[in-house]
């Protein structure tokens, strides 16, 4: 811990001195709205000032992205690929700095963030390898025509990201956009501005031309809104809350914006009595109590078969009570502080809501200390799917356990939600797994596994969890236009 804190101090010095500036057309620029403050959730201390971008800064960034677009679009694929690979290498070289800053900025534990930074590099490497093929089309012969399709980048795009694992999530959007040949204006979350700055620095050092990636910090209601309404921005890739996704769709309507929404979840993990219960227990714990539970794909509803419920919950309680909450830079820490005052108030409000609704607080349900936004990992049992703790996205280390008797009942409960991002099914009955996954309403389902991301597969949700898919060629479907040309034969 002491070593990590000392290293962090060195990395933060430049932010303490100069703050976080916006980056437009390869230049550092102050925000036209002045500055806002970045604070650490660990001890509520001031980290640095951040440029407060408004509509005027978004306009400048959109114009820079528009000006840089033809050059980036027309650069030889091999050259663009080289630059993106160098970005991946730059991320790897500075992974420790990225992870340390992210932990301090967001409260996420070092043990997870050190890996998340490297996943950012993987995202760049993966999409760098797709650069050449991204434009490939099809030849569709008809009796009188030779039909050819091609794909071209849609133009400058806006990327709006949330504060949970912000570095990794930003690369997840920005890497495919750049690989497609788009230029980008990135509006990072106001609660976690540090690592977006590191990414644009790394990208420019890798040879990304000025204006290809621009970063404007600021708040959703001004900078974010202006980005979604800007006429030069052709598409918005958004990750965040469902209600913000709906606002963005409305805001983008006048300029006919293409919108990709990756939104919230209330994901079920369904454990049947025939499952490998030790493996299931590990996965249940990992998928809600890692990354502070501030994770869209977390399994926040445990659906447990009635006949194994008592034993499974007893083991779960014992494990949850042992989870180490503490300083995020301590390598032993599993859960750090929640992101902000506001989010702390939201998560802890469910401690009372659960009681009012008649659930049992089987573990946690308490806050720790006064210094930062720390809560004990929490488990609610004796819950029903009608309770607010089972219906609303809490977005913290809080699990709600709901019993079921039959497969039919499990499916009904699992699908009885506004959301549909992920589902996790634990059973050793193959036929049941096939039947169940076929009917489960979710964009992504894992059977006998926690969430393991494989980059070529589609990522995204149904219902209030989103519209559109990322990953593999699905990303290019969003960042590119199809063109058809028919030649008379
Ligand atoms: P949020 O919706 O409050 O904010 C996300 C981003 O949108 C921020 O940059 C914010 O400034 C901006 N924003 C807010 N209002 C805006 C507006 N009117 N116009 C344009 N931009 C606006 O979300 P958050 O609290 O930062 O993040 C947590 C949420 O993100 C959770 O609901 C979580 O499930 C979701 N999430 C989803 C995925 C996914 O892949 N499905 C991944 C991570 C997080």
Image (cartoon, rainbow, N blue to C red):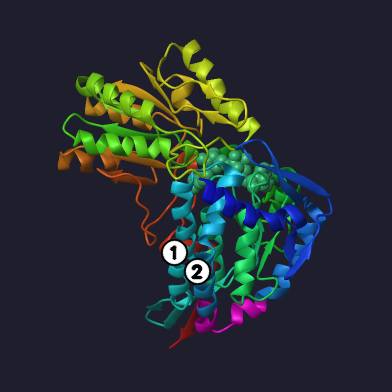
Q: Is residue 118 visible?
A: yes
Residue extending farthest front? 2
Circle 1: element type = helix
Front residue of 345/45: it is 45
List the single residue furthest toward the bottom: 489
Q: Is residue 263 visible?
A: no
Q: Report whether 381 appears left or right of 281.
A: right
Label 1 CB sits under 8 Å from any ligand 1 atom: no
Q: Residues within 10 Å of mark 2 (few under 14, many from 20)?
A: many
In which image quadrant can residue 303 be found?
A: top left
Secondary structure found at label 2: helix
The residue carrying mark 2 is: 88
113 or 79: nearer the eye? 113
Reading the chain from its start, which is encountered first: label 2 or label 1? Answer: 2
Image location (x, y in percent) of residue 186: 65, 58
Which residues fall within the magenta stretch? Answer: 70-81
Tell me what residue is drawn at x 39 percent, y 28 percent. Answer: 416
For the residues bearing labels 2 and 1, Cβ distance under 8 angstroms? yes
> Label 1, on which residue?
122
Q: Position of residue 262 (x, y in %)?
A: 52, 48
């Amino acid at each position: 811990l002491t070593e990590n804190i000392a290293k962090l101090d060195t990395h933060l010095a430049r932010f303490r001195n100069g703050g976080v500036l916006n980056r437009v057309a390869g230049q550092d620029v102050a925000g036209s709205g002045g500055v806002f403050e970045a604070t650490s959730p660990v001890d509520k201390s001031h980290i640095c000032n951040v440029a407060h971008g408004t509509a005027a800064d978004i306009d400048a960034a959109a114009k820079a992205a528009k000006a840089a677009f033809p050059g980036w679009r027309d650069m030889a694929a091999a050259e663009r690929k080289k630059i993106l690979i160098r970005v991946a290498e730059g991320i790897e070289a500075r992974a420790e700095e990225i992870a340390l800053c992210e932990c301090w900025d967001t409260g996420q534990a070092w043990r997870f963030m050190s890996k998340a930074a490297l996943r950012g590099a993987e995202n760049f490497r993966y999409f760098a390898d797709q650069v050449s093929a991204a434009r490939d089309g099809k030849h569709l012969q008809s009796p009188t025509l030779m039909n050819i399709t091609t794909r071209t980048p849609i133009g400058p795009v806006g990327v709006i990201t949330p504060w949970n694992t912000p570095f990794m999530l930003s690369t997840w959007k920005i890497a495919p956009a750049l690989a497609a040949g788009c230029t980008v204006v990135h509006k990072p979350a106001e609660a976690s501005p540090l690592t977006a700055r590191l990414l644009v620095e790394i990208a420019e050092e890798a040879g990304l031309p000025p204006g290809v990636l621009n970063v404007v910090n600021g708040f959703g209601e001004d900078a974010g809104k202006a980005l979604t309404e800007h006429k030069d921005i052709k598409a918005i890739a958004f990750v965040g809350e469902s209600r913000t996704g709906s606002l963005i769709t409305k805001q983008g309507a006048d300029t006919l914006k293409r919108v990709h929404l990756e939104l919230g979840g209330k994901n079920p993990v369904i454990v049947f009595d025939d499952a490998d219960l030790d493996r299931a227990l590990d996965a249940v714990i990992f998928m809600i109590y890692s990354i502070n539970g501030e994770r869209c794909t977390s399994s926040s509803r445990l659906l447990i078969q009635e006949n194994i419920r008592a034993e499974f919950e007893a083991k779960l309680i014992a494990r949850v009570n042992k989870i180490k909450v503490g300083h995020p830079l301590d390598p032993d820490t599993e859960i750090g502080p929640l992101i902000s005052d506001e989010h702390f108030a939201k998560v802890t409000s469910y401690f009372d809501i659960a009681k009012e609704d008649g659930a049992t607080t089987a573990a946690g349900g308490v806050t720790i200390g006064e210094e930062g936004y720390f809560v004990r990992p929490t488990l609610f049992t004796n819950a029903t799917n009608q309770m607010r703790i089972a219906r609303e996205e809490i977005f913290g280390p809080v699990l709600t356990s709901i019993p079921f008797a039959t497969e039919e009942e499990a499916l009904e409960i699992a699908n009885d939600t506004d959301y549909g991002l992920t589902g996790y099914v634990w059973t050793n009955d193959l036929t049941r797994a096939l039947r169940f996954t076929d009917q489960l309403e979710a964009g992504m389902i894992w059977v006998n596994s926690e969430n393991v991301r494989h980059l070529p597969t589609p990522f995204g949700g149904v219902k209030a969890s989103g519209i559109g898919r990322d990953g593999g060629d699905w990303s290019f479907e969003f960042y590119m236009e199809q063109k058809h040309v028919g030649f008379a034969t």
